Amino acid sequence: VLDSGIAYLVLAGYPVSPKDEEYVLVNNKCQCVTVTSKFVPSEENPDEEILVRNIRIMVPLKARENISDPLSPLRTTFIYRMSELCKNCEPMEIELGGVIHQVQQGNSCEEPQTCYTYDRNECYSSPVPLLYHGEVRHVPAALTPDSCFAE
């Protein structure tokens, strides 16, 4: 479901490859969404170019409601809001009146992002029962070892 609310966004992008003129505006690995833009010749007027945006959504099969719990029920609803996908929560410094301030361009950055699959940059773990000296203990097991043990 794409959010039908009106949102006015100004996005800058980076090219997909050095020779390609298609620009990636959003690459959200957590929600499996990529948004690209490209100028193409207009069908009505070949001398003009129009901007075309492509939204690629990969719906992960067998995604769980709680990705850290392999026993949670399968997810059946996926919601995509362009305003959330395009928000930029990276802090940056600006100077106002000779004073440096930390700001971020996005709002609602404190809310956790709903993840439909593992973001390979994040460390996910799940408690696993382990029998140790006759006693069952729950220890965290890494679900994304590359992220959890990267130096």
Image (cartoon, rainbow, N blue to C red):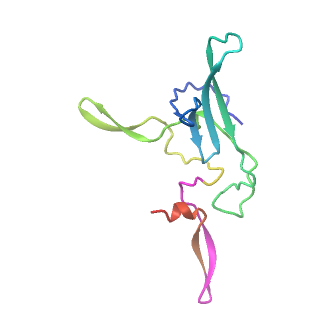
Residue drawn at x 76%, y 48% is 76
The outermost residue toward the left is 98
Total residue callouts: 0
In magenta, the rendered stretch is 119-136
Give the x, y percent position of residue 113. Answer: 57, 47
Name the quadrant containing residue 72.
bottom right
Residue positioned 62% across, 50% down in the render = 115
In the rendered image, residue 142, in percent from the top left (x then y), is placed at 58, 67
| Residue drawn at point x = 73 percent, y = 52 percent | 75
Q: Does the magenta-highlighted stretch encompass residue 130?
A: yes
Task: Examine the structure image and report whether residue 149 is included in the region drawn in magenta.
Answer: no
Q: Residue at x 58, y 32 (%)?
A: 20
Quarter of the rendering occupied by the C terminus: bottom left
87 w.r.t. 6: above or below: below
Q: Which of 63 and 135 is in front in this view?
A: 63
x, y percentage for residue 98?
23, 31
Left or right, residue 96 beside residue 71:
left
Q: In this view, does 56 lie above or below 29?
A: above
Residue situated in front as seen by the camera: 126 or 36: 36
